Amino acid sequence: MDCMDFVRPLTVVVFFFVAKNLTDIRISNVKFTLWIAIAYTLVTAVFFTGELLASIIVFVLLFTMIYTNGVKFIMSLVGAMATFIIMIICNTLSGLILKEMYPGIDYYVAAADNFKMFISLLISNSMLSYTLSKTIGFILYKNLKIKTVGSINRSIRIIFFVLTLIVLIFIYYTSLSRDVMRNPDIIYIYLVFCIFLIVIIYFAFNTTLKERKLVNSKNELKHLEEYTANIESMYNDIRSIRHDYANVISSMAGYIEDDDIDGLKMYFKQEIVPFSSRMELIDNNLSVLSKIKEPSLKGIIAVKLIHAQDINITTLLDIRENIHITNINILDLNRIVGILLDNACEAALECEKASIKMAIVKYNNMLTIVIINSVKNNKININKIFDEGFSTKDSDRGYGLSNVKAILAHYPNVLLDTNVKESEFSQIIYIEEKVREDNAECLHL
Amino acid sequence: MLNVYICEDDKKQLARITKAVENTILIEELDIKVVLSTTDPYEVLKHVECSTNTGIYFLDVELNSSIDGIELASKIRNYDSRGFITFITTHPELSYLTFKYKVEALDYVVKGENENLEASIRNCILNANNKFLSTKRQMRKFFYAKCGQRILHIPYEEIVFFETASTPHKVILHTLNRRIEFYGHIGQVASDLDDRFYQCHKSYIINRDQITMVDKKKREIHLNGDNMCVASVRAIKGLYD
């Protein structure tokens, strides 16, 4: 038992720092130190059996640390493997550098027993690997902003896994046989491997990023189109009302010119009274709409409800407080409300007493949007209607609710409550104004 | 024991409502007491703050004060989350969704209809009293789902299954006619429930009483309402142990 037994396992510390740099996990210093301490203790205990067992222990611990800090399973494996690759490469590199500086000494053999040599190897090794891992981490997380991309898709993850595994096996095997010392050219193969790996990583993430951007801009375009369509139909409504209005005036003028008071009376009863009651109905709803301080949402609701009234659905809109929309993308919300109101219209039309009721309510820090419609059929399978392609009607519909579900999946602060009861179908959206700390999850690889 | 609070800015109306409430209590011999009958909403708040009893509240929507009945009700909710709130209003049809979803009001009473007012108040009190007694007596167990600041309670026997949502920290509860997303963790949910529930998969908890069929080969558990959950290899063995 000499002091080298306690010094040698210090390499473990470097492993953990490299892993931390590579995966960009958020871990408290205390926990991180604890992980290192556990690894150090275990490795010290088993080091006499040779490197293999110690390596396995370090690998398992690295993987567990990464995995328990919110990284996906496969990517945690990749992270741990990448740590090993970098460590082996840097070890070889620093061995070679020292060999150049002090020719004639086999550093690996010497370092195993000599404290000074081991320390110099360890220092150069840790400096190299720390810089390398930090650089890779910087490129991945700061330059490419992978965190904002969120999770990359599964097939790319598996490709990564396989590639890293191959590289690791190759490097581990060659480094074990100590060929490197005898044949320094092998380091070039290492370098080629590394560059290859980095290039692949770069392209994979770049593609994911571009894909994401494309999907986003496509979505935005779609929203814009829907919004324009809504505005158009609103404009048409106004035009038709103006047209009706002009007609009413000119017919009245006709009666007055003819001095036909009885005719005018009849006309007033038959045409003007229903016309003005329709105007009033629209006005009623529109007056509450002014409480919504988000023009596009206001537009959507107005269009859908006026449309519902036109096809003889009784509508009710209940908003008492000023409504500001925060913590949800307004385009997403418009889309959801649009889909839900369309569905409500469709379902309500099947009933004899068709009605849609909508309310927007503030409840402490939470915004509640309620949409209720009458339904004919009480036996709706709540769990099926959210599936893609499901519709109670034609097969070409039914993408609505699955879209709602997909959009809401991006929001940890939004909840949906769907309910059928006593011939009423209700959808309640809860939007929390403040994203709770424990709900806001950092998206990692 | 239930406490009744009445807040109405018109003195005449206030007297009428109070009388109607007291008559009902007398005739039906209920364990209810009128604690406060006032025109000042802040007085109601002062009383509610230091009371531990559940209350029945009759609140005028349009109060001649700096706050209206709905704001008063939402303030009351902070102290008495299970209280029974009834609004007195002239236009119930316009705001009843707000009543229901903002302050979970029990009901509303329409002002001005003389004969009906007494009858509706009577109904409200009886309704509140029944609900109060039944939740006290009841052996039913409830699951409390946290939807942000709102807590929904669903009786155990109505629950078909729970599943994890694709968004982290969200769990979805399914009953035959309802689907509720709430904040939580499936493991935590599983430990809160009783024996009839069984976690058959890392993302599903089923209600054993709702099982219609178990397909051991495909490891599928079919539940009422045409629902199906996948079970893990280990869990399908332990299902009936």
Image (cartoon, rainbow, N blue to C red):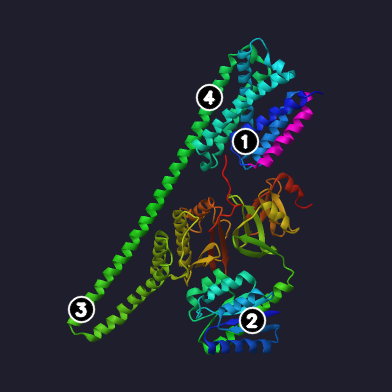
Choose between A398 and A293: the one closer to the eye. Answer: A293
Quadrant that contains the C terminus of chain A: top right
Per the rendered image, the range of residues in magenta is A27-49
Disc 3 versus disc 2: nearer the observer: 2
On screen, residue A353 above or below A158: below
Q: Which dot, 3 or 1, sits closer to the camera?
A: 1
Find residue B4 and name its label. Answer: 2
Say which residue appears at 70% left-offset and 46% top-offset: B232
The three-letter amino acid code for the residue at tag 3 is Ala
Residue type pointed to by label 2: Val
- Which amino acid, mark 4? Ile
- Badge 3 is on which residue? A253
| Residue A193 % position (x, y) | 56, 23
Query: With respect to residue B153, does B72 lie above or below?
Result: below
Q: Nearer the viewer, mark 1 or mark 2?
A: 1
Q: Is residue A435 magenta?
A: no
Residue at which label 1 appears: A20
Residue B109 coordinates in the image, percent (x, y): 55, 81
Q: Residues within 10 Å of mark 1 (few under 14, many from 20)?
A: many
Give the Cα distance between marks 1 and 2: 62 Å
Q: Identify the secondary structure beneath mark 2.
A: strand
Q: Are marks 3 and 2 on the same chain?
A: no
